[in-house]
Image (cartoon, grey):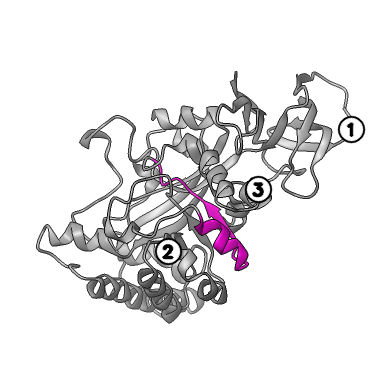
Amino acid sequence: MLLIENAYIKTMAGADIACGQILIDGGKIAAVGETVAIPEGELERIDAMGRLCTPGFIDAHCHVGLHEEGIGFEGADYNETSDPVTPQMRAIDAINPTCEAYAAAIESGITTVVTGPGSANVVGGTFLAMKTWGKRVDDMVLKDPVAMKVAFGENPKRVYNGMSKSPRTRMATAALLRELLFKAKRYADEVDAAAADPEKKAPAFDMKLNAMLPVMHGEIPLKAHAHRADDIFTSIRVADEFGVAITLDHCTEGHLIADELAKTGKPVFVGPSLTSKSKYELKNKTFETPKALADAGIKFGIITDAPVIPLQYLPLCAGLAVKAGLEIETAWKAITIHPAELLGIADRVGSIEVGKDADIVIHQGNPLTDIDSTAAVTIINGKIVCRN
């Protein structure tokens, strides 16, 4: 057992606790409060000395482990550009958990990432949610799959135009996704009918369409790379046509259409904002987007798209959103409980509550307001994995 005491606890599940304790047992949070009952037995104590204690941070959209730090082609396993439609690709098969990005993340308090394929393809494959500490990816997985990556806008048409293949226009991108969804719906209906009635023949196995079953059954959403307003609306249009769930990732022009986005009720993940305007669809990029979404009543997470922004700068991005007008409590939520809820993993992570995974960070300073803040202690699954 492990006891954290004398901590300023930001639980993200209610009011802060100005001076409290957290008891950890078996990798889970066993108790939290101003004082907790301490059972008999071997106990390790950590004196937080009044420091800020938060849930581990969550980056809801990145490519760490598939796009390895400091490596070129040999570590670039995030885009299978032999085909614009590759739903059968699984992030878990390409992740290298020894990539240095994970260690840097732990030292900044990021304990959970959602990582997966890039945006070269119209359909890229499945993302997973995983912890940032471990040796074998299979043991680090929190949820797999957590979403199916799709991409709109410049990237797919730029990649395949260079190969003289479709898609070369936004029309073709939407058409390829529609074609897959049409086929996947029919395939899912036939699979479901055969499961319900043994006399009905199941369809011939199709790797791509089988990979789409969790989407068609409502178990996971499409994870839509969409920066520009028109691309965001196209992603929503296609998803709604087939009744499938979708999250709007990047949402660079979300501040221009916040009122319309609020009507849709779609989850949003904003970023990467700490970058140059490297292509036309980023021309309206601003750290003011989170405030506009919050003012419209939209629940969102803040993301790095690492390695576009190094993963360890996730709290800095939240802090820069505060500088641009976002309320600081909303910024805290955008890198903890809100992404957990939007990703369907809030039963495990995102807040300091009894029964959840013991992913906890004791900070030196405030990572949203202090540029020199770092993690004094990072705990993942009840284990101390970083101590500065």
Magenta residues, as a range?
288-306
**Tag 1 and tag 3, C-beta contact below 8 Å:** no
Marks 3 and 2, the one that precedes in the sequence: 2
The residue to which callout 2 is attached is 253
The residue sitting at 31% across, 55% down in the picture is 119
Is 376 within the magenta? no
Marks 3 and 2 sit apart, C-alpha to C-alpha, by 22 Å
Marks 1 and 2 sit apart, C-alpha to C-alpha, by 46 Å
Residue type, numbered disc 1: Thr
Q: State left or right for residue 337 relative to residue 303.
A: right
Marks 1 and 3, the one that precedes in the sequence: 1
Residue type, numbered disc 3: Ile
Q: In which quarter of the image is the N terminus?
A: top right
Residue type, numbered disc 2: Glu
Q: State left or right for residue 31 relative to residue 363.
A: right
Q: Furthest residue to the left?
A: 164
Q: State left or right for residue 388 relative to residue 184.
A: right
Marks 1 and 2, the one that precedes in the sequence: 1
Marks 1 and 3 sit apart, C-alpha to C-alpha, by 27 Å
Q: Is residue 162 above or below residue 25?
A: below
Residue 98 visible: no
The residue sitting at 51% across, 77% down in the picture is 196
The residue to which callout 3 is attached is 328
Q: How crowded is mark 1: few (under 14 residues within 10 Å), some or many (20 or more)?
A: some
